[in-house]
Image (cartoon, rainbow, N blue to C red):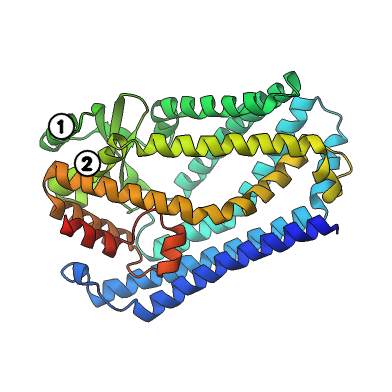
Amino acid sequence: MTTFQLIILFAFLLVTAFGYGLKFLNLRHLKKYGDVVPEEFKDYIDADLLKKTRDYTVEHSKFGFVESVFGNILVLVFFFGGLLNIYNSWIVSFNMPFILSGIVFFLILSYANTIISIPFDLYSTFKIENKYGFNKMTAKLWITDFIKSIILSAVFITIMTAGALYLVKASPDFWWLFVWLFFLLFSIFMMYISPYVIEPLFNKFTPIENEEIESSIRELMKKAGIKISRVFKIDASKRSAHTNAYFTGIGKVKRIVLYDTLLQKMEKGEILSVLAHEAGHWKKKHVIKMLIVVEAMSLIGIYAAFMIIKSGILAEIFKIQNDTIFANLLILGLIGGIISFPLTPVFSYFSRRHEREADRFASEMTENPEAMATSLIKLSKDNLSNLHPHPLYAGFYYSHPPVVQRIKEIRKI
């Protein structure tokens, strides 16, 4: 193993150990305080439900740890045990055209990853989620979803790989710019077509039947200056008892989608508060701001990748016999994950700040902060959310403020 390879290995193990350390702190904190009902939840949660919430978080965390360790062992074997070189040489041995080689290279890895994840997904869905009353999915529906997912995955991987590699071949010196632009345009295109083509493959979208709620939603969105095309509900309850709502679409016209489980469990004022919160993200331009930051970083990253691949240094470090761009991209993905890990709390911080701004927007627009607070209480209760995350863990990973703290801040408004 080369010196640089050892440095990358050490960095990977350090990042992994740090992440596991935070998860351990979070679990220990939950076990210590998990039987304390927060003041904000005293009228909604009893000791039995709180114990169920704690057990659900602990079980999911332990299962996630096992899955993560297994995945990381595979990563170590693949990148540092010589498997990448063997796989890369095997693909090269077929002497396929450049673009076809890339498609096959990434498709096989994608399917291998999918197959490996099947036992974990089955256990999570039919064991853990079933145990805590969330899973509503049948084996038939799981298989149907799985088949649709792998077909869609194959289509997207083929389109993106073929497009990117065509640009690499057509413009050896400026492909980094053209590939970045291609991925940006493709992601925007997917935002447009997903509500009409992709999402209906998995869920049935129907107009909400409660005309009073629909009228109130339209009036609320008009007040916020947001034009909506339709208000839908989806049959989420056929898969899970979890609740949610979201905006979809891009541009001036949006679609509002409500889980049927949300409509069953929340009052009108609470539903309006949840949607006003989502409207706050659009009005405060949070989505655009984050997109700009992410795309700017992506452009820097892809240029750095171009320069590194051009140097040929990665093939030397990892002893790749056939220096292909495919193998280089995989190695860069590994290194990129290590380098970007310290940025996780930075992105989490700005995401939490955006959530607070959206909460304030919703509370002020509806003039009903209490409905916003109770909607969060019900969402947390129904989804068995952890009410006692460790501050360091929440600060590092949480995209939303911890729910108890969030409710306190809303009620101060």
Give x and y (percent) for residue 396.
Answer: 47, 60
Left or right of 388: which side holds 111? Answer: right
Name the residue: 25% across, 77% down: 47
Left or right of 287: which side holds 253? Answer: left
Q: Residue 271: which numbered mark, if any?
A: none
Q: Is residue 392 above or below residue 190?
A: below
The residue tagged with tag 2: helix, strand or loop? helix
Residue farthest along the bottom direction in this orientation: 32
| Res 303 quadrant in image | top right
| Amino acid type shown at disc 1 | Lys
- The quadrant of the image that shows the N terminus is bottom right
Name the residue: 22% across, 41% down: 276
Q: Is residue 76 above or below residue 276?
A: below
Mark 2 in CB contact with mark 1 (< 8 angstroms) = no
Give x and y (percent) for residue 28.
Answer: 45, 77
Left or right of 308: which side holds 402? Answer: left
Label 2: how many Cα within 10 Å (few below 14, some 14–19, many 20+): many
Give x and y (percent) for residue 194.
Answer: 43, 30
Give x and y (percent) for residue 224.
Answer: 19, 33
| Res 223 quadrant in image | top left
| Res 102 quadrant in image | top right
To which residue does mark 2 refer? 276
Q: Is residue 377 visible?
A: no
Name the residue: 38% across, 68% down: 389
| Amino acid type shown at disc 2 | Ala
To which residue does mark 1 refer? 223
Number of marks drawn? 2
Q: Earlier in the sequence, mark 2 or mark 1?
A: 1
Looking at the picture, tell me which residue is in the foreground, 201 or 189. 189
Looking at the picture, tell me which residue is in the foreground, 162 or 21. 21
Left or right of 339: which side holds 229? Answer: left
